[in-house]
Structure formats: structure tokens, C-alpha cells
Image: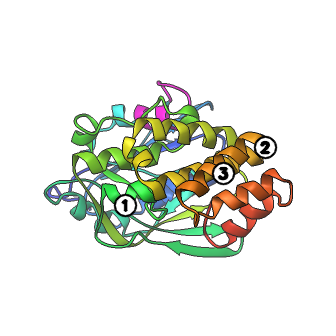
């Protein structure tokens, strides 16, 4: 049963060639213990549309679309936003699932004065290992984002005011190389136009696996993070934050075989913050004393990434 007092939520799920995981993601959205209506828009990116997935029942609908914008995650999400009927936009990756009370807990926080985006925590599943990452505090400030990605604030926990996406916040940036870090960019921009609220609880289960499209795409990390540094001056101005980003880029360069560039970028990271661990890791990988895959396996098993 739905009520008129709860805003309609449009959940945008961008997908490509993962039908079994997609089915679980869609089911987790439709099964929400939320009093308002939920519209699911599945956007097929670089894959055939499956019209048989469409459905229409009281308070719960599923629509299927082809990506009509630039190829990739950012364009697919914007295609869903363009077609959305809800006042609240939410994202769910096609290999993630929402916990049953996600929207019931988040939407009221989003509706508070001045809030443009709300996030929550995640439970990471990596093989048999599970780890929880929950953003601390009740809000995320721009200063928090300048020095940390705030990993728990995963895009599968995002709920956003549609009016903000069509106005002061703007759509997902489709110019980011490979679409890498488009969610981080959205958080950075949201912090400049309003408040980011946090529900300090696990709201989504996130699957880390080799099939993740950014799991091993080193050029995406290198170019995407470089783009974000140029776009957001606050990232370059924060020594700790820039050291973190340059350390990530250095590690990606080393993993991609760009050994000299990796060494130079790692040195930049260490000069900015001698305690930043990614710089030394990048140097070890560049010197072929350590494999990037081994580092990632160890980090992922602890619920962390590079």
C-alpha cells in the first residue's frame, strides 16, 4: 500500500550483461518497506533491452530503456534521470542490493530543509568475507570529501532530490574519462549547493568481484582522477587529499606498467604526505617487488580498495 504523503522514488539501475545479478537488484528495490510509490528504470547500456522485465502494479512499476546518451555509467544514469517520474532519484548498481528499510530510513532525511543528497553505509561482500563501511556522523561536509572518498557513501546508497539534479546540482558528469569517479564528483558538487545527510546504518550490500567494470581498469583510474583534480580545486589544495589521489594514480600507473611515471607520481604523493601508504605501495609495484593483484586481494579482503 502506498500513501500520498511519501514522495515517489525513481530508482535508476544501469546495467550491462549481468542478468542474474540485475534480477536480485531489481527485487531488492521492489521489496522496499516504503509507503510511497517506487518506479524502477532499468537502463541497458551497450546491451540489448529486455522488454519482458517491464511491469506495472499498484505502487511499484518497472520500465526498461536503452541508454540514449553517452555510452557508460554516467550516460545511462542520466538517461534514467531524464525519464524519471519521481521527485526523488536513487541509484542502485546492477550487482548490488538494497536492505528492505533503505528508503523508509533515507527519504525522510532527504526531505529535511537544505538537504540535496542522502547516503548510508554498505556491507561489502568479497568472496566469503563481509565488511561494513558506514560514514561517520550525521552529515558529510565538503572538507570531509577533500581528504577522503568516504568509502561508505557508495552510489547504491544515494538518494537525491530530482529538482537539484535538474537545477543547481546538475546531472551526472558524462565528460569524466571512462566515467571513473562520477559518484565522487556528484558528492563534491552536492556539498557545494546543499547538505549531504547520512543515515549511519548499512543500507546496501555491495558485491566486489572480478566482473566489476572498474575492478582492474587502470587507465580509467589514472585519467579519471586526473580529471577530478583539475575540476575541483579543493582537492588539489588539500595536501592530505591530493596525496591520497596522487598515490592512487601512482599505484594505477605502476599496475599498468608505466613504471617511470608511477615513480614520479608516488614521489609527489609522499612529498605531500609522507604517511600516505599508496606511494610506497606504488614504488614497490613499479620496482616489481610486489604485484598489484596481491595488494588488491589483501585490501579487498579487508573491505578496502586502493
Point out which mark residue 103 bears: none
Whether residue 279 appears in magenta in the rendering, the answer is no
Label 1, on which residue? 144
As helix, strand or loop, the secondary structure at mark 3 comes to helix
Indicate the quadrant containing the N terminus: top left, top right, bottom left or bottom right: bottom left
Which sits in the foreground, 24 or 304?
A: 304
Instruction: Give the answer, above or below, for where 298 lies relative to 107.
Output: below
Horizontal and vertical percent position of residue 73: 52, 38
* Residue sitting at x 47%, y 59%: 240
Question: Can you name the residue that lies furthest to the front here?
Answer: 271
Which color scheme is applied? rainbow
Is the residue under label 2 in contact with that under label 1 (CB below 8 Å)? no
Crowd rating for badge 2 (residues with CA inside 10 Å; few <14, some 14–19, many 20+): many
Give the mark nearer the N terminus: 1 vs 2: 1
Q: Distance of mark 2 from mark 3, alpha carbons? A: 10 Å
Label 2, on which residue? 259
Whether residue 68 appears in magenta in the rendering, the answer is yes
1 or 2: mark nearer the eye: 2
* Residue sitting at x 42%, y 34%: 173
Crowd rating for badge 3 (residues with CA inside 10 Å; few <14, some 14–19, many 20+): many
Give the mark nearer the N terminus: 2 vs 3: 2
* Residue sitting at x 66%, y 57%: 279
Instruction: Give the answer, above or below, for where 85 lies relative to 277.
Output: above
Point out which mark residue 266 bears: 3
Q: Quadrant of residue 220?
A: top right
Indicate the quadrant containing the C terminus: top left, top right, bottom left or bottom right: bottom right
Instruction: State which region is magenta.
Output: 67-79
Which sits in the foreground, 182 or 101?
A: 182
Horizontal and vertical percent position of residue 283: 75, 55
Give the mark nearer the N terminus: 1 vs 3: 1
Amino acid at each position: 500500500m502506498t500513501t500520498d504523503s511519501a514522495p515517489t522514488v525513481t530508482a535508476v539501475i544501469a546495467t550491462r550483461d549481468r542478468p542474474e545479478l540485475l534480477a536480485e537488484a531489481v527485487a531488492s528495490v521492489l521489496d522496499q518497506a516504503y509507503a510511497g510509490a517506487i518506479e524502477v528504470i532499468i537502463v541497458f547500456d551497450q546491451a540489448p533491452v529486455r522488454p519482458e522485465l517491464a511491469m506495472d502494479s499498484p505502487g511499484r512499476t518497472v520500465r526498461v530503456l536503452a541508454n540514449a546518451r553517452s555510452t557508460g555509467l554516467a550516460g545511462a544514469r542520466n538517461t534514467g534521470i531524464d525519464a524519471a517520474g519521481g521527485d526523488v532519484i536513487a541509484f542502485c548498481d546492477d550487482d548490488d542490493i538494497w536492505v528492505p528499510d533503505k528508503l523508509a530510513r533515507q527519504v525522510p532525511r532527504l526531505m529535511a530543509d537544505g538537504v540535496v543528497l542522502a547516503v548510508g553505509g554498505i556491507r561489502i561482500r568479497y568472496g566469503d568475507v563481509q565488511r561494513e563501511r558506514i560514514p561517520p556522523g550525521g552529515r558529510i561536509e565538503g572538507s570531509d570529501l577533500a581528504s577522503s572518498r568516504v568509502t561508505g557513501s557508495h552510489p547504491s546508497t544515494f538518494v537525491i532530490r530530482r529538482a537539484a539534479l535538474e537545477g543547481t546540482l546538475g546531472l551526472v558528469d558524462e565528460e569524466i574519462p571512462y566515467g571513473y569517479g562520477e559518484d565522487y564528483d556528484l558528492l563534491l558538487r552536492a556539498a557545494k549547493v546543499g547538505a549531504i545527510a547520512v543515515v549511519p546504518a548499512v543500507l546496501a550490500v555491495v558485491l566486489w568481484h572480478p566482473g566489476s567494470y572498474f575492478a582492474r581498469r587502470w587507465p580509467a583510474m589514472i585519467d579519471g582522477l586526473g580529471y577530478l583534480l583539475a575540476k575541483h580545486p579543493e582537492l588539489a589544495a588539500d595536501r592530505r587529499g591530493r596525496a591520497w589521489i596522487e598515490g592512487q594514480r601512482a599505484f594505477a600507473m605502476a599496475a599498468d606498467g608505466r613504471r617511470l611515471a608511477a615513480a614520479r607520481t608516488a614521489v609527489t604523493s609522499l612529498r605531500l604526505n609522507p604517511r600516505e601508504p599508496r606511494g610506497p605501495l606504488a614504488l614497490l609495484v613499479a620496482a616489481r617487488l610486489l604485484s598489484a593483484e596481491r595488494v588488491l586481494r589483501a585490501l579487498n579482503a579487508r573491505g578496502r580498495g586502493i
